[in-house]
Image (cartoon, rainbow, N blue to C red):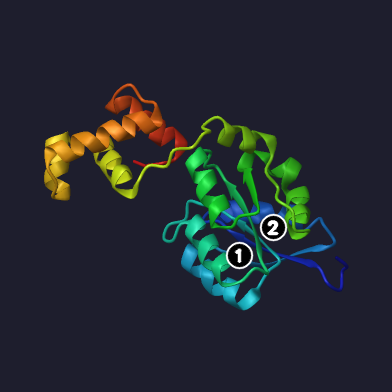
Amino acid sequence: MTERHPLTVMIVDDHPVVRDGLNAMLSTEADIQVVGEAGTGAEALSLLAKLHPAVVLMDLLLPDIGGAEVIKRVCSARSDTSFIVLTTVAGDEEIYRALEAGARGYLFKDMVRKELIQAIRTVHGGQRYIPAQVGSRIAENLPRQDLSLREIEVLQLVAGGLRNKQIGHRLGVSEATVNAHVKHILDKLYASDRTHAVTIALRRGIIRL
């Protein structure tokens, strides 16, 4: 990139202080220009359609549309923008979802000062940027066994304190069906009981409270 044709970057984070800090950091690079900021998923989608930045720094925890969903919508429509997830979310399922949606890089916010500029240039060059700390988080849970949408729904209700009979009533299925779902959940998560399954799912980002 040159000063005439800078590498354009957009920042998406719901915390103004974070956006200001990233802006200040990037402003020291002569070949990088921040062209837009957004605090919500909807605002991000609107600005992205107008600005077409080369790289987007994307938080996952936004107040409306999740960051992974924003990435998925944009990447399914065009491929001229590269996304780097910049977040505190460290669960392996969250990482999988973001990468499957189309993210080219994934950084935890405590890595930013050391690795952000390198990550931006790397993904803009067409490569992925997955630091060892992120890669090891994914590797810890391989082979990966996906929970079905219904199993995630059941597990979310378990986390909310409902018993199997109550879950069955809520979902309109028999208690025996819920029992079967719970058994499959325990098997897939290698969990010893319901509480252990919830703990694993929360740590990995499969469900949220």
Q: Label 2: how many residues lie within 10 Å, few (<14), some (14-19) or many (20+)?
A: some
Looking at the image, which residue is at 53% across and 46% down? 96
Q: Nearer the viewer, residue 159 or 41?
A: 159
Q: Quadrant of the N terminus?
A: bottom right
Mark seen at residue 23: 2
Looking at the image, which residue is at 29% across and 24% down? 193
The residue that disc 1 covers is 37
Locate residue 203, reporting x and y percent: 44, 33
Looking at the image, which residue is at 30% across and 34% down? 184
Q: Amino acid at mark 1?
A: Glu
Q: Amino acid at mark 2?
A: Asn
Q: Which of the 4 image quarters holds residue 115?
A: top right
Q: Is residue 45 above or below residue 11?
A: below
Locate residue 9, reporting x and y percent: 70, 63
* Residue 54 seen in the figure: yes
Label 1's element? strand
